[in-house]
Image: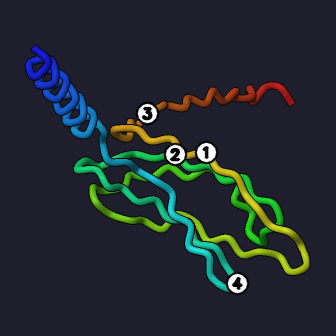
């Protein structure tokens, strides 16, 4: 009876372990390459699909203002350079970031209609 119970527990453990290991998807992550006078930020896509990313960096103490968000499509299994940050001298530098990953990039088309008021030639 105990060997049957041990077999069931072992089977359940192997089943759960294999389910968990197969269900974890490879990720898209930010890679920081710190060099002597600059920091280069890359986004690496380890998945088998193209991903669309939104990256917003909030730097403090860097020469280049990186306040503008970056929206790019990252091909599968590649590493793409996103931003170069150059620190100011004699200032403590650090940054925070928001990285949002989407399956695809959706283009939104909008039409701008401009209404121009024409002045009558009689009104002077």
Mark in front: 4 vs 3 = 4
Quickly name the residue at label 3.
108
Mark in front: 2 vs 3 = 2
Could you tell which of marks 4 and 3 lies nearer the N-terminus?
Answer: 4
Which quadrant is home to the N terminus?
A: top left
Above or below — where is 85 with respect to 36? above
Quickly name the residue at label 4.
37
Label 4 to label 2, Cα distance in Å? 26 Å
Element at label 4? loop
Outermost residue on the front side: it is: 1
Which quadrant is home to the C terminus?
A: top right
Outermost residue on the bottom side: it is: 36
Quickly name the residue at label 1.
98
Label 1 to label 2, Cα distance in Å? 8 Å
Tell me which residue sits at (11%, 25%) in the image.
7
Could you tell which of marks 1 and 2 lies nearer the N-terminus?
Answer: 2
Could you tell which of marks 2 and 3 lies nearer the N-terminus?
Answer: 2
Above or below — where is 15 with respect to 56? above
User: How many C-alpha atoms fall within 10 Å of the one at disc 2: few (<14), some, or many (≥20)?
Assistant: some
Element at label 3? loop
Label 2 to label 3, Cα distance in Å? 15 Å
Could you tell which of marks 4 and 2 lies nearer the N-terminus?
Answer: 4
Asked if the residue under mark 3 is in contact with the one under mark 1, i.e. CB atoms within 8 Å, the reply is no
Image-quadrant location for residue 37: bottom right
Element at label 2? strand
Residue 21 is situated, as x and y percent measured from the top left of the image, at 25, 40
Quickly name the residue at label 2.
54
Q: Is residue 115 left or right of residue 3?
A: right
Mark in front: 1 vs 3 = 1
């Amino acid at each position: 009876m105990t060997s049957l119970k041990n077999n069931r527990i072992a089977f359940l453990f192997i089943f759960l372990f294999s389910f968990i290991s197969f269900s974890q998807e490879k990720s898209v992550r930010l890679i920081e390459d710190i060099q002597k006078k600059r920091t280069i930020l890359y986004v690496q896509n380890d998945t088998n699909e193209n991903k669309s990313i939104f990256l917003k960096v909030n730097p403090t103490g860097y020469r280049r203002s990186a306040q503008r968000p970056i929206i790019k499509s990252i091909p599968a299994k590649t590493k793409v350079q996103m931003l170069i940050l150059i620190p100011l001298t004699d200032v403590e530098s650090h940054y925070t970031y928001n990285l949002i990953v989407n399956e695809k990039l959706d283009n939104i088309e909008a039409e701008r209609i401009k209404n121009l008021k024409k002045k009558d030639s009689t009104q002077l």
